[in-house]
Image (tube, rainbow, N blue to C red):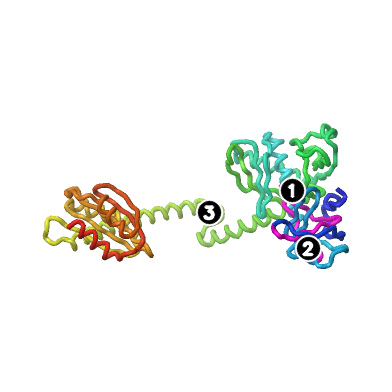
Amino acid sequence: MENKLFYQDAYKQSFTGQVVRQEQDEAGNWYLILQQTAFYPTGGGQPYDLGTIGGKEVVNVEEFDGEIRHYLESPIEELGKEVFGEIDWQRRFDHMQQHSGQHILSAAFDYLFQYKTVSFHLGNEFLTIDIETESLTEQEAKRVEELANKIILENRPIEIKWVTEDELSQYPLRKETKVKEDIRLVIIPDFDYNGCGGTHPKATGEVQAIKILDWERQKKNIRVQFVCGNRVLVALHQKQKVLLELTKLLNTPEKDMGQAVIRLLENGKLVEKSFEQARESLLHYEAKELLENSKTGNEETIVTSIFQNRTIQELQKLARYVTVEDAKSMVFLVSKNEDRLQLVCARGTARLENMKNLIANALRLINGKGGGNDSFAQGGGASLITGKEMIQHLVEIIK
C-alpha cells in the first residue's frame, strides 16, 4: 500500500512520482504506471480521480493486478524521470463528501429500522443506495435524514484502521467485508464500522449535509436518491430557481404552488376535452360534406377523397361516419404522408362487397400491409403510385 498516497493522506493534492512504464492497452489507449501515486482508481463504488500528470490530462484511472493505470489524453514524451501529478481537488473532495455521506445514511437506515444497504452508486449529480426493504414511508425517510444530519453536526471523527481478518471480530461491522487481507475499516465511533477502500474526510462535519431527494421500488428493494455536501447547495439552487420561475409564470406564492399546478392541469384537461369534442364535430361535418358532394342520384354512393398528411385514425373516423350516415355508401380514402400512402376502404351495412379482399388487391401496388374485415379495412405502403391512381384502381375493381 506504500505506493497509494491517497491512503496515506486523502487531502494530498499534488505529488511527484517515478515513471515505471508507459504502454497502450488492447484498445490503443495510453496509460502510465508510476512508482507512487495520489490518483484514486475506480473502486468500491467511488469513481476515479481526474487531474494532470506531466502536463497531460488524466482521463481515467483503473487498477489491474495491483497496478494503477493512469490513462492519459496523449503519451508523455520524456520518460525515465520523475513527473509531477496534480489532483482535481474539487472532484476528489466531492467524492469524499459523497462517500462518507453514504456511510452515514446507510448506517442511519440500519440503526433506526435495520434496513441493510445492498448496493451503492455515486453518480455525477446524485447518489443512490438500494436498501433491503419493500417499502419506505415519508416519516421513516425524515427520521433517517434527521439522524444522519445530527451525526454530521456532531463532527465526529472518521477513523481509518488497517486490520487482519482475525481482528475483525473486535468491531461491530455493519456488513461483512469482501476482502480477506489488507482490510481497511472506516469508523465513525459508536455509530458505524464498515470495510471500505474509498477516500474520506477526517470528520463528519466536512460532509456538511445530507438531503434525501426521492425513492422508488427497485425489484424487492427501495432505491433511495440523495445528495451530500456541496451538492445539497447545488440541488437547492436549481430547485429554487425553478420555483421562482414558476411563481412568476403562475403568479402564485410558493406555498400555494401545488394547488396552482393542480388547477392548471385540470384546466388543461378541460381544454383538451373541448378540443377533442370540436375535432369530432368537424370530422362529422366533413363526413357529411364528403357524402353530399359524392351523391349522383343513384341509390349507391361511392365516396372518394385524397388528403395530405392525415392520420390513419382520422381516415378511419371519416369512413365510419360516412357509412353510418348512409348504409348504401362505399368509402375510399387515401392520404399521402411524405413517402407513404395510407388508405381506408369501408362499406355501409346495406352493401355486400368484401373490403378486406379489396384492400389486399390495392396494397399489392404499393408493397403495403394492412388488414380488416368484410366491411372495413385499412393499410399503407410506399407511394409508388399517386393517390389519384389508387382511387381509380379501387373504383375500377368495384365497377
| Separation (CA) of disc 2 from disc 3 | 47 Å
Q: Indicate the position of residue 380 as horizontal and vertical percent values.
A: 34, 57
Would residue 233 be seen by someone viewing this image from the given angle?
yes
Bin the neighbour count of mark 2 within 10 Å (Cα to Cα): few under 14, some 14-19, many 20 and up.
Answer: many
Which amino acid, mark 1? Gly
Residue 257: which numbered mark, if any?
Answer: 3
Q: Which corner quadrant of the image does residue 222 belong to?
A: top right
In front: 8, or 329? 329
Decide whether the magenta segment is chiefly helix, strand or loop. Answer: loop
**Stretch in magenta:** 27-54
Would residue 90 be seen by someone viewing this image from the given angle?
no
Q: Residue at x 72, y 60 (%)?
A: 29
| Separation (CA) of disc 1 from disc 3 | 43 Å
Disc nearest the viewer among 2 and 3: 2
Residue 43: which numbered mark, if any?
Answer: 1
Q: Residue at x 58, y 60 (%)?
A: 244
In front: 398, or 234? 398
Residue 51 falls inside the magenta stretch: yes
First in residue order: circle 1 vs circle 3: 1
Q: Is residue 270 left or right of residue 84?
A: left
Bin the neighbour count of mark 3 within 10 Å (Cα to Cα): few under 14, some 14-19, many 20 and up.
Answer: some
Query: Which residue lies under the disc numbered 2?
Result: 52
In front: 287, or 104? 287
Which amino acid, mark 3? Met
